[in-house]
Amino acid sequence: MSINNWPKTEQPRERLLSYGVETLSNAELLAIYLRTGIPGKTAIDLARELLTHFGGLDKILESDFKTFTQIKGLGVAKYCQLKATLEIVRRHYNCKVEESTSFCNQDLARNYLLNNFPNTKNETFACIFLDNNNKLIKFEQLFKGTINQSQVYPRIVTQSCLNNNAAAVIFAHNHPSGNLTPSHSDKLLTKQLINILSVIDVRVLDHFIVGKDDIFSMAQNGMI
């Protein structure tokens, strides 16, 4: 039976309008995105099947073109629509961040990094450059490494701070293993960078270890 023939109170779009988008399940949200099903399956049926096949909503959103379009009912148009929607959301969030009066808020920094840090299997070291009021100047990926380390050159970090006229900086790098505990070398590097940047009056506010769904703050845990 077509979703249009369901009782209004059970149709995803009607439920969204009546009760709010936050009340919808992942399958209902995905069904609204899909708009139509395929022969023999409603959009809800297809959504549930996709969630099972990929292993969750996040896996669908992160899938590449080849993996996504191999599934019947998911073509080029839906892939482009999905990626465009994700980019709109990311840019909307970044606009809100740029309007923020301060980047000292831990939750703001955490959400910004989860929204912008590249989803990569290799370690990447990045900097958030801030002005004297801790407002965002630029987010920049400086170094890319292997699956368990990235070589960070303090000279390059210092040059980047000067080039961006930064008064403060937040460091971030990912641990592809998923273990968010800072390594001994992470701690030594952080101390080294703090000492070097203090000479040019650049404050180090934090160093974040980035995972897939969570972040570890060295400052919040008394390491800075």
Image (cartoon, rainbow, N blue to C red):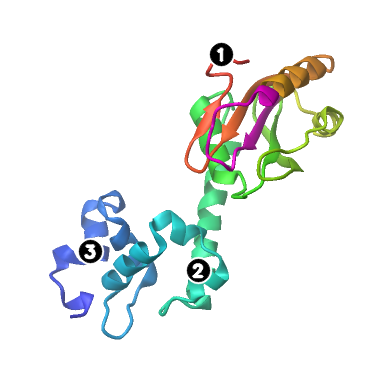
**Residue that carries the numbered disc 1 in the rendered image:** 222
Q: Nearer the viewer, mark 2 or mark 1?
A: 1
Q: Quadrant of residue 192?
A: top right
Image coordinates of residue 114 in percent, x first then y, are 53, 41
Q: Which of the pair 21/80 is nearer the observer?
A: 80
Residue 66, relative to residue 9: is it above or below?
Answer: below
Residue 175, relative to residue 206: is it above or below?
Answer: below
Name the kind of residue labelled 1 in the image. Gly
Name the kind of residue labelled 3 in the image. Glu
Q: Quadrant of residue 74?
A: bottom left
- Local crowd at mark 2 within 10 Å, few (<14), some, or many (≥20)? few
State which region is magenta. Answer: 169-186
Q: Residue at x 53, y 34 (%)?
A: 179
Q: Residue at x 56, y 41 (%)?
A: 177
Q: Quadrant of the N terminus?
A: bottom left
| The magenta stretch spans residue 172 | yes
Label 3 with label 2: CB-CB less than 8 Å: no
Image coordinates of residue 73 in percent, x first then y, are 41, 79
**Residue that carries the numbered disc 3 in the rendered image:** 14
- Left or right: residue 13 versus residue 154 is left
Task: Mark 3 or mark 2: name the one nearer the start of the chain.
Answer: 3
The residue most toward the bottom is: 39
Residue 4, relative to residue 52: is it above or below?
Answer: below
Say which element carries label 3.
helix
* Badge number at residue 26: none
Q: Quadrant of residue 202?
A: top right
Q: Is residue 145 visible?
A: yes
**Residue that carries the numbered disc 2 in the rendered image:** 81
